[in-house]
Amino acid sequence: MNVIAHDVLLRFGDNPSSYLAMNTGTAQFAEHGGTGFVPHVLAGRHHALALFGPIAANADGKRRLWEDFERWCAKNDRAIVVLQASQDFGRVLARRGYAVNQLGAAFSAQLEDFDLKGKKFKPIRNNIGNASRAGVTVRELDHDDYPSVRDALDDIDARWLRAKRRGTRPLRFMVGDRYQARQRARRIFLVEHDRRIIGYSTFVPSPERAGNGYLWDLTRRIPEAPRGTNELLIRTAAETLRDEGHDWLHMGLTPFVELRNEWELSTSAHWLRTVAGLVASRGAWLYPARNNLRFKLKWHPQRVVPEYMGFQNGASVTAVLATLRRLGVLP
């Protein structure tokens, strides 16, 4: 764990999901003589996947850092693919000649008035009531107790994955890492039933520039968990964060949804947008975008913002396949 990078991230990151840059296995390209960095991984023999873009103190630092990263990639014969770029950085990429397409949208719920009252939250209340009547409880894990539950959480991960469609793989790089070194910054809420752990969710801090709050990251539960388990878990965590004075529960990116015409940039690849729309509507085998979106919208998030992907040498099939393989979506 690079402590300097961690501090820079929390001070200067501008994406609520920026903490994903701290995942195990994610490299940090650092600006020569500076404190900024570009989180990235290598994909295949000829691509580099950059997450979010440059993280630095100001616009000039970001520009110099990105130019350094481009030169480093060119020297190593790697074309850049950017994932989860903001709209502002997407425009920067478009001006630099990248093909830039909307990847999806990120959602955030305000915590100040979080109470689940009113007709619109009735389905959530009904599900929570079902889980509570079944004896499901939620508690935050003390970090010192993590070693004692790690095997149980590993077992939940395995059972959750086995319950998915055959061939499903856990997404890498763009989701959280329960094993990353700076574990105390990661908060874990456990779901218990009949004296055993049946699920959990993890939450990580969002950078100052992205709003005072936490990113709701991983959620896992066993297939036979009572209906309403996830809703009870999220409500408990949200109320805890609200009572601590945090402003936002960031729900992160859902790929391939909210693909709006007004959010497309001038250099977008039309064929890729068509493919993204097909994945959203018919591609649950590739990514369950509809189910993911449906659950987030149940909480009536007040903030919805687009996020983008950018391809340095055009949105070629080769670049897309290299990206999907590195993310674990394809073998």
Image: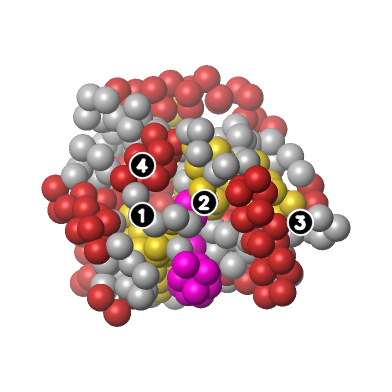
Taking the image as shown, residue 94 lies to the left or right of residue 232, namely right
Residue at left 25%, top 75%? 261
Secondary structure type for disc 3: loop
Q: Earlier in the sequence, mark 4 or mark 2?
A: 2
- Mark 3 Cα within 10 Å, few/some/many (few <14, many 20+)? many
N-terminal label among 2 and 3: 3
Q: Which residue is mark 2?
A: 80
Residue found 62% across the figure and 41% down from its top: 76
Say which label, 4 or 3, has the lower sequence index: 3
Judged by depth in the image, the label closer to the viewer, 3 or 1, is: 1
Q: Earlier in the sequence, mark 1 or mark 2?
A: 2
Q: Which residues make up the magenta segment?
A: 80-97
Identify the mark at residue 315; answer none if there is no mark: 1
Front in this rendered view, residue 299 or 18? 18
Cα–Cα gap, marks 3 and 1: 27 Å
Residue at position x 23%, y 58% from top? 271
